[in-house]
Amino acid sequence: MERLQRRALLDTASNPDGSIDYVTGVEGIFSFDDDGTCASVIVRYVPDRLILKPNTVEDYLSALESAHWETIEEVAVTLLGDLRNELVARWLQVTVKLCLTSAPLGHLSLFLNGGFGSSRFDVKPLVVDGSSGGF
């Protein structure tokens, strides 16, 4: 699926109160590869003018399932780019957790932060955590 078609699936609505800063988010799960490896996605953001409609994430993640992904980083960077483009949020965090049931690792988490304009929010560097103890 082309980038513009994929991004068109991210339906937005007006922020109910753009005068205050608040953190909101959505979550979803999708199949990462042909082996059925599960990946969960958590998106947290401080909206500016737009918010994501709740049902839009399910359709968007279904579209991501149809693509071939080499790495978890590729998925996370795609999510971050698409969401940054459509939301233009003040702050945005994408977390992708890949469930590795056959490995003793337990999971691999990838965090990407990115936002526009506001210096009120800390934009942290990329962190990859492969420990079995979580974050």
Image: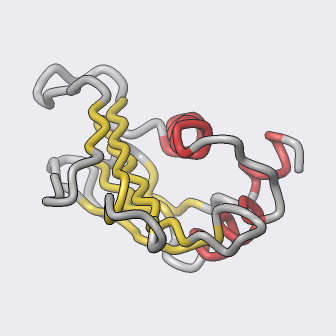
Q: In the rendered image, which quarter is residue 129 located in?
A: top left
Q: Give 7 or 108, whichever is nearer the viewer.
A: 108
- Give coordinates of residue 101: x percent, y percent: 45, 73
- Give coordinates of residue 132: x percent, y percent: 21, 59
- Give coordinates of residue 111: x percent, y percent: 33, 42
- Picture layout, residue 115 above or below residue 45: above
Total of numbered circles in the picture? 0
At x 26%, y 23%, the residue is 125
Q: Give 66 or 123, whichever is nearer the viewer.
A: 66
Colouring used for the render = secondary structure
- Picture layout, residue 126 above or below residue 42: above
Q: Give 35 or 119, whichever is nearer the viewer.
A: 35
- Give coordinates of residue 28: x percent, y percent: 49, 73
At x 80%, y 40%, the residue is 3
At x 16%, y 48%, the residue is 21
Left/right placement of residue 132 relative to residue 114 reads left
Left/right placement of residue 114 relative to residue 14 reads left
Left/right placement of residue 105 relative to residue 100 reads left
At x 77%, y 52%, the residue is 6
Q: In the rendered image, which quarter is residue 23 located in?
A: bottom left
Q: Give 68 or 101, whichever is nearer the viewer.
A: 101
Left/right placement of residue 28 relative to residue 115 reads right
